[in-house]
Image (spheres, grey):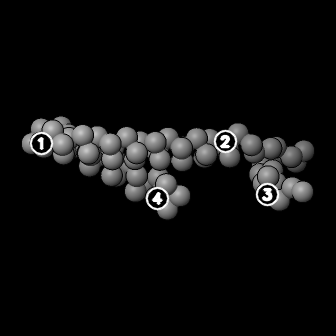
Amino acid sequence: MEDETTFETALERLKECVKKLDEGELTLDQMVSTFEEGAKMAKICQDKLGDARGRIFKLEETSSGVFEAPQEADDVE
């Protein structure tokens, strides 16, 4: 599921979980389930942001001042 879920979708689902928990109308079991889903969505967001940050930090400036992304690890033999 993590690879299929976009950052935007996970963030939206996380917001929905927070809203449900804030409303305070859930049973204890529903609260725990909603919290678990929110934690999963938060982890997906955190992972996606970490991946994006890593990609940005890997950018290398060429001598002409143009930014280029380095070769992916899968491209290197």
**Residue 1: image tag:** 4
At label 1, the amino acid type is Thr
Q: Is residue 46 visible?
A: yes
SS of the residue under disc 4: loop
Q: Quadrant of the C terminus?
A: bottom right
Q: CA distance from mark 2 to mark 3?
A: 16 Å
Residue underneath mark 3: 74
Task: Decide which of tag 2 and tag 4 comes sooner along the chain.
Answer: 4
Per the image, the residue denoted by label 2 is 54
| Relative horizontal placement of residue 66, taking residue 43 as reference (left or right) | right
Q: Position of residue 42 (x, y in %)?
A: 41, 42
Query: How far is disc 2 from disc 4 in space, using C-alphas?
Result: 21 Å
Is the residue marked by circle 4 packed among few (<14), some (14-19), or many (20+) residues within 10 Å?
few
Residue found at the far bottom of this picture: 4
Number of residues whose C-alpha sits closer than 10 Å to that of mark 1, classed few (under 14), some (14–19) or many (20 or more): few
Mark 2: give few (<14), some (14-19) or many (20+) Cα within 10 Å: few
Position of 30 with respect to 40 (left or right) is left
Residue designated by label 1: 27
Q: Select label 2 or label 1 by which is in front.
A: 1
Looking at the image, the residue that sits furthest to the front is: 29
Residue drawn at 70 percent across, 39 percent down? 57
The kind of residue tagged 3 is Asp
Q: CA distance from mark 4 to mark 3?
A: 23 Å
- Give the spatial CA distance, label 2 vs label 1: 40 Å
Residue 43 x, y percent position in the rendering:
46, 42
